[in-house]
Image (cartoon, grey):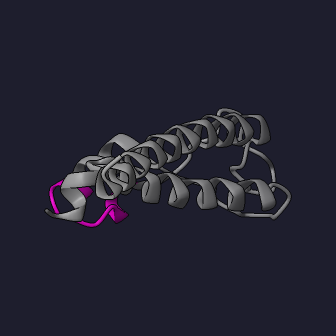
């Protein structure tokens, strides 16, 4: 039985959510850095690419700001914080699903 078949798409989703969380955290941390360009990961596109055996790198893009700043920084703090919170909730959901799946497998192996 393949591990990917047992965990389904949620293992890949968890890795991509973690990658996106790091990217969004970096954006927030650099909100005051001149000429910093905010990046984001298109989660749906990345998940599709990983599912087809490709790298998710082309799903990363630079964020286009609604209100450009004079110093060239494209981070909009409210946008980044909202995206971070939504991603964290989705990460937690994937983690909970995987935890339940692993718990079920553990009980099955123990014969409970």
Vertical position of residue 85 compared to residue 111: above or below? above
The picture places residue 31, in percent across and down from the top left corner, at: 80, 54
State how many labels appear: 0
Q: Residue at x 30, y 50 (%)?
A: 108
- Looking at the picture, tell me which residue is in the foreground, 110 or 85: 110
On screen, 50 above or below 101?
A: below
| Quadrant of the image occupied by residue 53 | bottom left
Looking at the image, which residue sits at the far front?
A: 111
The N terminus lies in quadrant: bottom left
x, y percent for residue 107: 38, 50
Q: Which contiguous range is marked in magenta?
A: 49-59
Q: Is residue 95 visible?
A: yes
Q: Does 51 appear in magenta?
A: yes
Res 42 visible: no
Task: Give the camera-side residue of 7 and 88.
Answer: 7
Task: Please name the residue shown 81% across and 64% down the image.
Answer: 33
Nearest the eye: 86 or 30: 86
Q: Residue furthest right?
A: 32
Membership of 27 in magenta stretch: no
Query: Residue at (30%, 51%) from the top-left corner?
Result: 111
Instruction: Report the side of 9 relative to 20 (left or right).
Output: left
Asked if residue 1 is positioned above or below residue 8 in the image, the reply reads below
Q: Residue 48, image x and y in percent?
A: 24, 47
Q: Is residue 16 left or right of residue 38?
A: left
- x, y percent for residue 96: 52, 41
Of residues 110 and 7, the one drawn nearer to the viewer in this rendering: 110
The picture quadrant where one finds residue 44 is top left
**Residue drawn at (16%, 64%) of the image:** 2
């Amino acid at each position: 039985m393949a591990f990917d078949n047992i965990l389904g798409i949620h293992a890949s989703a968890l890795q991509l959510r973690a990658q996106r969380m790091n990217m969004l955290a970096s954006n927030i941390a650099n909100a005051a850095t001149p000429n910093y360009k905010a990046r984001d990961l298109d989660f749906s596109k990345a998940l599709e690419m990983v599912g087809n055996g490709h790298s998710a790198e082309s799903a990363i893009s630079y964020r286009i700001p609604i209100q450009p700043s004079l110093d060239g920084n494209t981070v909009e703090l409210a946008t980044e914080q909202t995206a971070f919170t939504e991603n964290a909730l989705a990460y937690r959901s994937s983690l909970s699903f995987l935890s339940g799946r692993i718990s079920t497998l553990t009980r099955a192996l123990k014969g409970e």
